[in-house]
Image: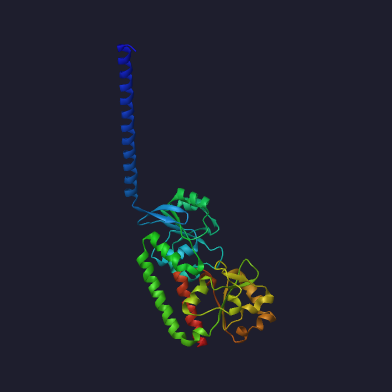
């Protein structure tokens, strides 16, 4: 290779290296600029990155326009001092407005729990959407395009865990612990009230469903079953022996198996659409043979808080227990 050719070769090589270095510097500069933009956006949105059942979401520190996708989430939000701008109507039990009363004033309805009105949700411009159960990954992706969306896992017999998770997401952990302390103090007072009756009373909790034309009993793993257990009360042995799986919160009964409801005290949660069904069973001869019926210890209660719920429902159940168990001591 001649001297001129070598010189031209090294000049080209030098230019190629120089251009490569410039590209690397430019890319790094762009990367840092983009990183700074992202950091700036996170600071401006004032949110916390929260892990939840369906992923990670940057939850606003002080959400102002919260929408909940179930009445259970509505109950928890209200208990923590957050009033959602919108919530659905119940699709499975009596409407929680039955016992939440004036706390529901001004809340917009967005359809049924299983048929949410997406257009209305979009029009309301939420800054946070909260679900306690039921969102599919596809629905989660859809809602996440509307507003930051989170889902909290709910297990009936472990409702306090869900409450704490909800509080963590909303930055309300301190309020949650205060509510649970008050609740546990009430539990202790009821234990003192019942004294030695606790180990003797067998409590049965039944539900007459608006969509299933058969009654059921709630197991030891259900929401009301867990509350009874905290007090030290238990369901009839014949019921508990039928349920071994913690995922089984109920057993559906035919008229021929209605004897499984027998107990010292029977609480019957009747859905609004099941009043005629309940009357039908009350008129049957088999119903009248139950010891609890003969002893006039059957009490009709509100399915909006007896079937599943959180801290407000749990306290409402305690109110009923104090009211009706006092007659048995």
Residue drawn where x is 34% and y is 38% of the image: 31
- Give residue 112's position: percent from left, percent from top: 54, 59
Image height of 118 relative to 155, above or below:
above
Q: How many marks?
A: 0
In x, y percent, where is residue 92?
56, 65
Percent across and percent down for residue 133 are 51, 60
**Rendered location of residue 284, percent (x, y):** 68, 79
Seen in the picture, residue 235 relative to 143 is either above or below; the reply is below
Closest to the observer: 309 or 260? 260
Residue 167, picture quadrant: bottom left
Locate residue 54 relative to residue 264 in the image: left or right. left
Quadrant containing the N terminus in the rendered view: top left
Residue in the picture at 35% in, 53% down:
47
Q: Quadrant of residue 262?
A: bottom right
Residue drawn at the location 47% of the way across and 73% of the way down? 314
Q: Nearer the viewer, residue 104 or 203?
A: 203
Horizontal arrangement in the rendering, residue 292 relative to residue 35 (left or right):
right
Q: Is the image coloured rainbow, by chain, by secondary structure, or in one colour?
A: rainbow
């Amino acid at each position: 290779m001649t001297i001129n050719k070598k010189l031209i070769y090294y000049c080209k090589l030098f230019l190629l290296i120089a251009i490569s270095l410039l590209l690397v510097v430019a890319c790094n500069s762009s990367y840092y600029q983009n990183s700074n933009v992202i950091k700036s956006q996170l600071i401006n949105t004032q949110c916390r990155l929260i892990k939840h059942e369906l992923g990670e979401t940057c939850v606003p520190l002080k959400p102002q326009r919260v929408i909940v996708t179930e009445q259970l989430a509505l109950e928890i939000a209200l208990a923590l001092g957050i009033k959602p701008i919108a919530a659905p109507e119940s699709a499975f039990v009596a409407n929680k407005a039955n016992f939440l009363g004036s706390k529901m004033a001004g809340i917009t309805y967005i359809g049924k729990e299983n048929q949410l009105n997406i257009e209305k949700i979009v029009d309301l411009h939420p800054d946070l959407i909260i679900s306690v159960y039921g969102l599919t990954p596809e629905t989660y992706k859809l809602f996440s395009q509307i507003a930051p969306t989170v889902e909290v896992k709910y297990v009936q017999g472990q409702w306090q865990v869900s409450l704490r998770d909800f509080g963590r997401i909303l930055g309300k952990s301190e309020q949650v612990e205060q509510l649970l302390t008050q609740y546990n103090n009430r539990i202790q007072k009821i234990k003192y009230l019942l004294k030695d009756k606790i180990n003797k009373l067998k409590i049965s909790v039944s539900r007459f469903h608006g969509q299933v034309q058969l009654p059921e009993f709630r197991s030891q793993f259900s929401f009301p079953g867990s509350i009874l257990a905290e007090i030290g009360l238990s369901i009839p042995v014949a019921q508990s022996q039928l349920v071994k799986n913690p995922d089984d919160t109920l057993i559906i009964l035919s008229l021929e198996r209605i004897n499984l409801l027998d107990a010292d005290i029977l609480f019957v949660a009747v859905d609004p659409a099941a009043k005629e069904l309940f009357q039908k069973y009350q008129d049957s001869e088999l119903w009248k043979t139950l010891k609890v019926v003969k002893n006039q210890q059957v009490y009709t209660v509100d399915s909006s808080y007896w079937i599943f719920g959180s801290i407000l429902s749990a306290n409402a159940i305690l109110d009923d227990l104090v009211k009706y168990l006092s007659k048995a001591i």
